Amino acid sequence: MRLLHVTDFHYRSLWFEWVRAHAFDYDACCFSGDLLDMFPSAPINLYRQARWVRDWLWDFPRPIFICSGNHDWWTVEAPLVDTDTRAGWLRKAARPGVSVDGAEVKLDGCRFICCPWASTPAVTGIDPVVLLVHAPPAGTLVSSDLGDEVGDPDVAAAVMTLPPMSLVLSGHIHHPRRWHCRLGPAWCFNPGVELLQNEPNHIVIDTDARTAIFHGYGREVGPVRLDP
């Protein structure tokens, strides 16, 4: 199975449309959080962004798996009722073929798990998983942002308990020291972000051939063999 891994689009519509245009090249697409943009420079507010992304997902042509990131998650003061908070807007997008926070879905023999932002993944069973989690595991090359460690230690501890040959797809760190690394039983990935590109950084994973190829910063790297 060929997987497309992207992350941290921060509401760049050009990148969303790139994914749609290339979706049929893959068996499934994986998005590891921060679909929205809460930076002050964002062109529209989070509610309008969320509505646009839900519309984009409505007729997405291939299976897609998404976990929320910190830019997809906000709170409001009580007593205001807002069902879009805490990534509620993303859960509203769930339907067959669109798997979001909290989902555990099997596709072509692979078990996909989408972990919400601010949660620690808890995985049971002995079959390998494809785990989507926004923050990468701390202490790894995919979590070091230009030399500063900003990964999640709880995610790192959870990864160590995964079944052998699992894959961990993350983002959050825009400039990781490397786009892949091995941690215990799992291979971990973070494509990073280059905001000035016309197409997003992305990783192509072939679960049958056990290979991964990185595309970004105007170059292609790989394939890397995902040995057990």
Image (cartoon, rainbow, N blue to C red):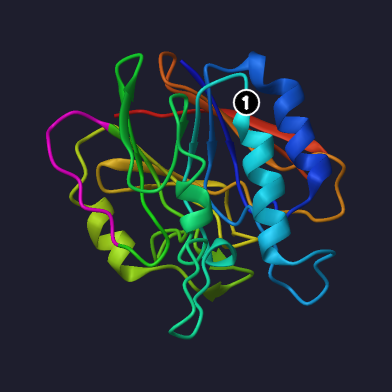
Left or right of 218 in this view: 19: left
Pick the front one: 183 or 67: 67
The spot of residue 53 in percent (x, y) is 67, 45
In-image side of 193 versus 96 (left or right): right
Is 104 covered by the magenta stretch? no
Query: Which residues make up the magenta segment?
Result: 120-128
Residue that mark 1 sits on: 60
Q: Would you identify the image quadrant in which residue 31 lies? A: top right
Local SS, label 1: loop
Nearest the viewer among 81 and 41 is 81
Point out the image quarter for the C terminus: top left
Up/down of 107 relative to 190, above or below: above
User: Quick check: 44 above or below 204?
Assistant: below
Q: Residue at x 51, y 66 (%)?
A: 73
The residue at the point 47 percent across, 72 percent down is: 81
User: What is the total number of numbered labels drawn onto the structure image?
Assistant: 1
Pinpoint residue 107: horizontal percent, then vertical percent. Answer: 36, 19
Q: Position of residue 174 (x, y in %)?
A: 65, 61
Q: What amino acid is at disc 1? A: Phe
Rendered position, 5 above or below 13: above
